[in-house]
Amino acid sequence: MRPDLPWQGILEQQIKQIKSAAVFIGKDGIGPWHQVELNAFLREFVDRGCPVIPVLLPNAPKEPKLPIFLKAMTWVDFRKGKPDPMEQLVWGITGKPARGVTRTKFINPAPIIAPTYFQDRHVETNLIVDFLKNDAQCLMTIVGRAGMGKTVIVCRLLKSLEDGRLPDNNGEMSLDGIVYLSENGTRQVTVPNLYADLSCLLPDDVAERLDNVYRNPETSTESKIQELMKEFHSGKVVLLLDNFENLVDTVTLKINSAEMDEALQAVLNLPPPHAVKVILTTQIVPRDLALLYNERQSRLNLKEL
């Protein structure tokens, strides 16, 4: 756009050529200038019968304030993993149902919006990739003080892997699914959440059978988890348990949820190869868990840059 030209006129010219519009809504909602543009799109698109798609970003409020005309339209919600929001967005833009837009199914929004660029930490990122490629290991613990970038490193990598590629143009890598759980996110780290969300990656009939297993009060947590893990007999799935220090006693260094402790031990008790890869980010290492099957675990201690 030439510096001396009024942007309003150019915007109006562009609106006449646009076939669809997506309105992205984050934590700050819709501002005054956004409202002006929305009104212009609405007038033009109603006349031409073109779609205007409201899109809720991962950090959008629980009950976002939307203009009346947007409330009447089907949202694309990136705060949820199902239905796949990217497929929904492509469907809305093109008018054709999309399949396989991303190679990886992801459940729940990531706990943070990952940056596309992150200075340094390339060595640490490569160590996480090595863990994901190692079928003999099933648990990685990433340890560091608050603010050292534990969650950022993992989420940046996983966000890139949602599209089947490694960050920083380091090639391709495919995953079959990612489950995000975080003590500071929208979906907390609990065994019911872990079990239900991993089940979402399985066929409906398998998920229904596993749900019946989980609801049986006579079945131990270990047996439930092992039944779940047996269904992931191929491929690769990542389960992120973020801010795990909230579940670790600061004095005894034990996991303060007996159910979670039993669940993670059940994962470690299973022999390789491991299709489900569990990543913990924590300020405190759960001591008893760290002593189990060292050959099936990996630890990454973050240091100051």
Image (cartoon, rainbow, N blue to C red):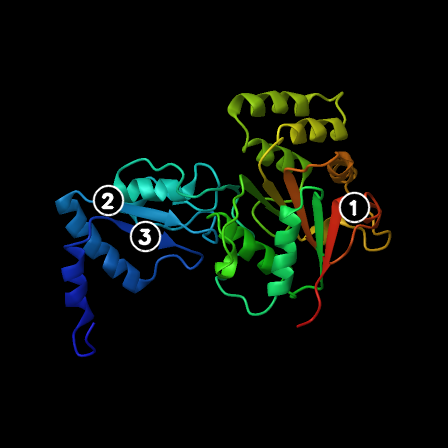
Kind of residue indicated by mark 1: Glu
Q: What residue is shown with label 3?
A: 23
Q: What residue is shown with label 2?
A: 51
Neighbour class for label 3 at 10 Å: few (<14), some, many (≥20)? some
Q: CA distance from mark 1 to mark 3?
A: 49 Å
Residue at 18% across, 67% down: 8
Residue 114 visible in the snapshot: no
Q: Quadrant of residue 234?
A: top right
Q: Quadrant of residue 148?
A: bottom right
Secondary element type, mark 3 = strand
Kind of residue indicated by mark 2: Pro
Q: What residue is shown with label 1?
A: 295
In this rendered view, identify the residue nearer to me: 110 or 239.
239
User: Eyeballing the image, is 108 above or below 119?
Assistant: above
Of label 3 and label 2, which has the lower sequence position? 3
Kind of residue indicated by mark 3: Val
